[in-house]
Amino acid sequence: MSYILDLLLTQIFGQPFLLLAIVVFIGYIAMKQKVSKAIIGAFKASIGILVMGMGSSALIANFGKLLTVLQNTTGIQGAGLNTYPTMTASYAKMDAVLGEGTGNSWGIYVLLIGFLMNLALVALRKYTKIRAVYLTGNAMIVQVGISTYLVWRFLGTGMIPTILIASFITALYWGIGATLLIKPTKVITGGADLTVAHQQMYVAFAAYKIAPLLGNPEKDDIEKKKLPTSLNFLQDSVLVTLLVMLISTAVIMLVVGKDGVDWLRGADGFNQASYKNPVIFLLWISITLTANIWVLLAGVRMFVGELMMSFKGISEKLLPGAVAGVDCAAIFGFAPKSVVLGLVCGAIGQVIGLLLLLAFKSPIFLVPGFIPLFFDNATVAIFANKFGGWKAAVVLCLCCGIIQILGSMLAVSMMDLTWWQGSADYATIWVGVIGIFKFIGGLFGIPVAG
Amino acid sequence: MLNILCVCHNGMGTSMLMKINVNNICMENGISATVEACAHGEALGFLMTTDIVLTSPDILEMLPPTDAKIVTTLNLMDKAEVTRLLVDCIKENFPNEIG
């Protein structure tokens, strides 16, 4: 009996690669697809989650070496800003205490129950006013990972209460945020029946409200102006990720000096004695980190499509009247010039933020990432430009970039992770949520876990 | 069997939703196709085996040159419009692939 219980609970429903396959399989069957299709989809999801794990453990280990040498030489704690590694780093923290695979399995339950709670909130829209269902699966998996770790870390709760509390706060975040953006998204897309469901919803809503005070959307609409296309290369996610890694690694190598670089080359570091030339070593590190990120993304891509298909099917079947909350990039085509403007101003803002960290001798330093930098500032710029013109977009994206850095610094200091989500909502309202949970945990004298 | 490629900025969110929609469109219209999703920065490798690219006009500017047929629309989430454009493109260029 106990053997069967262990088989079910630990070896099947506690193993992310099997749990996710089961979820995908049920999704296909619920949508009346062929069994053969369901099996293929389930296996692909399994492979995907393991590929993600390979990319993420290599990335966390390799990036960790840079952070270690930085901390040993200067005492500064470092963290990278990127969405997916933040999820896997959160799970790694939980696994270290609870056992391999626990974090991710709890996260998958939070994903399912959180999604169902979002549907319930929309079904009760008469009372909740929530009308949007969050369908952006690639953002959802990251957000549930952070919520799960956050609740477990500060409340020290067991499996079921952690899953329920994390599901509830995430479902509220999804439903309220995506509902706030229904009206402005309709204006931007010229009447399309969708809303933005991503990770800068509350900041984009603030931009929509503040922008009219900062400029004239009729006179200063950047979409009606001519813009050079030479900045387009900045939209290449592969290239920008490498560029940021190259600059950050170069800065770290300069800061830690010759001894630090020698340590990185040595057995405790990357164990790459053959890269004697520092420039070639720098190139090797940056390209390796970028490659690690891409393996991770390839894995996510393999399973997230399967999950999204189920969620979309279930939502359309159960709640035909709900507004679909989709990836922010779905509206980028409507305002391509705002996208570039947002990216450039957000990048300047982030650099100012990093300089502020240095100027105020912050004990934490951050390495920016393409996803929070590009997708958040592009989205904020679209809303700001539409309702306040390009001047409003410039001001708001500069602020957004600075806030992303400073807010993330606060989050990292409370969450004790080597990676942080870094996007606008996770540098503002989520910092507040973390603070509240930390306060509640402290109030009841709960020791911080992990 | 057609190869259709959905392209967005990071190959994770929008193109994934497009892929789901296109799979359904193909099923509903008797089109036999394999659908992939990717970012424009990594599209080159996919394009060699792609018959039809589905993307938005601004991303098209950043794609490498290709012999594949191109379908673009501003609202990539508008299933009715994507259906119309895609079916027209297939009828015109690959009449044998549609049932």
Image (tube, grey):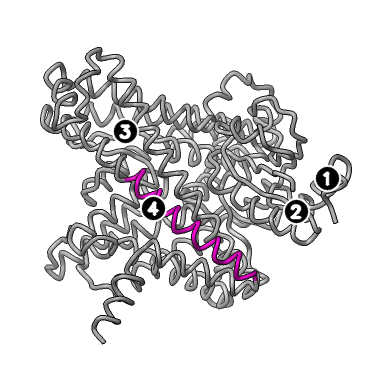
What is the magenta range? A33-56
Q: Which of the two labelled residues, at mark 3 and mark 4, occupies the earlier sequence position?
A: 4
Label 1 sits on what residue type? Answer: Ile
Q: Is residue B22 above or below residue A318?
A: above
Residue A222 location (% of width, % of height): 65, 30
Tag 1 and tag 2 share a subunit:
yes
Mark 3 element type:
strand
The one nearer the camera, A100 or A411, is A100
- CA separation, marks 4 and 1? 36 Å
Q: Which of the two labelled residues, at mark 1 and mark 2, occupies the earlier sequence position?
A: 2
| Residue matched to label 3 | A367
Quarter of the picture containing the C terminus of chain A is bottom left
Q: Is residue A42 magenta?
A: yes
Residue at (34%, 40%) from the top-left corner?
A81
Label 2 sits on what residue type? Answer: Ser
| Residue matched to label 2 | B32
Residue A112 location (% of width, % of height): 45, 69
| Residue matched to label 4 | A50
